[in-house]
Amino acid sequence: MLPPLKLYDDVYVLKHSPLVRGMIFTLRFADENRGIGLTKSGAMNRKFVHWAADQFDWPGYTASELFEMNKVLNEHDMQPLWPVHDLLRYLKLLRQYKGRLVATKKGRALAETPGAFFDLVAPEYLYHSIHDEGMEARGGPLGNWDIFLNVINVEARTGCTLAHLLRTLYGWEEKEDFDPKHSNVRFAFKFCVIRPLCWLGLLWEDREGVRLWDDGTYYKTPLWQAALKLDTDSQAVLRLV
């Protein structure tokens, strides 16, 4: 059974959730600019992508970081735009009209209420979206969201690494030699569990002093406590004492 995912307490959603912030900013841009221009392939145009990179403040995908690798930005160059675009269309918050994406009446209304926006988007994104097509085509992470959330709830009480979570869940230690089975599980868990939790804003990653391709330490945000009621809540609290 999937743990309910909705706001039980008041929290500043736009501060903690890159996904909700990006989706709401996108709706506001569309409303203020008579829509978002589309390329012939149906992607958001460069004008909007450059604006999004500058305004979203998405960890790991800021304008300075993206322009280090690209002279210009297309939608596929900014990975967070994939769920932003797909969810806005799927939830009928944006619609296509004369070659542009325009905000719907529902989208404009929800953009003014971040809490209600989170309640609509969060379960659809976390539980029902395809977070990485390649990984999920090979079976995805081993386990389910009830297990993942309850384990992270306890283990991330004072911060934890990806290696620690893999050891707790699967009993696997990091190895110096390449192990394809371990590698597949590691990447599936990172891109189908940890990254969505960070993008939704339930976790944040401390990357201070971490090399580009290494993982940081993950912590629960105030949004985690405000949006989840889990079986392990008492354990998480007791271990903090």
Image (tube, grey):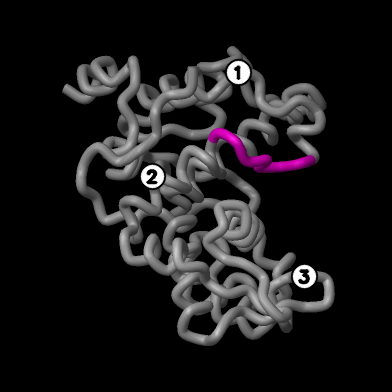
Residue 179 or residue 38, whichever sits in front: 38
Image position of 152 with respect to 129: above or below = above
The CA span between labels 3 and 1 is 35 Å
Mark 3 lies on residue:
42
Q: Earlier in the sequence, mark 3 or mark 2?
A: 3
| Magenta stretch: includes residue 130 | yes
Kindly identify the residue that appears in the image at 56 percent across and 52 percent down.
Answer: 91
Q: Quarter holding the C terminus?
A: top left
Q: Amino acid at mark 1?
A: Gly
User: First in sequence: mark 3 or mark 1?
Assistant: 3
In the picture shown, does residue 34 fall above or below 180? below
Q: Residue at x 42, y 24 (%)?
A: 3
- From the viewer's side, name the closer residue of 73 and 2: 2
Observer-nearest of 186 and 122: 122
Decide if residue 49 is on the left or right side of residue 150: right
Q: Residue at x 73, y 24 (%)?
A: 182
Residue 152 visible in the shown view: yes
Q: Point out the stretch of residues depicted in magenta.
A: 127-133
Eye-nearest disc, 3 or 1: 3
Magenta highlight on residue 15 = no
How crowded is the residue under tag 1: few (<14 C-alpha within 10 Å), some, or many (20+)? few
Secondary-structure class at tag 3: loop
Tell me where residue 210 appears, x and y as whole percent. 52, 51
Look at label 2 and name its amino acid. Asp
Q: Earlier in the sequence, mark 1 or mark 2?
A: 2
Q: Which residue is mark 1?
A: 143
* In front: label 1 or label 2: 2
Q: Could you say which disc has been placed on residue 119 in the image?
A: 2
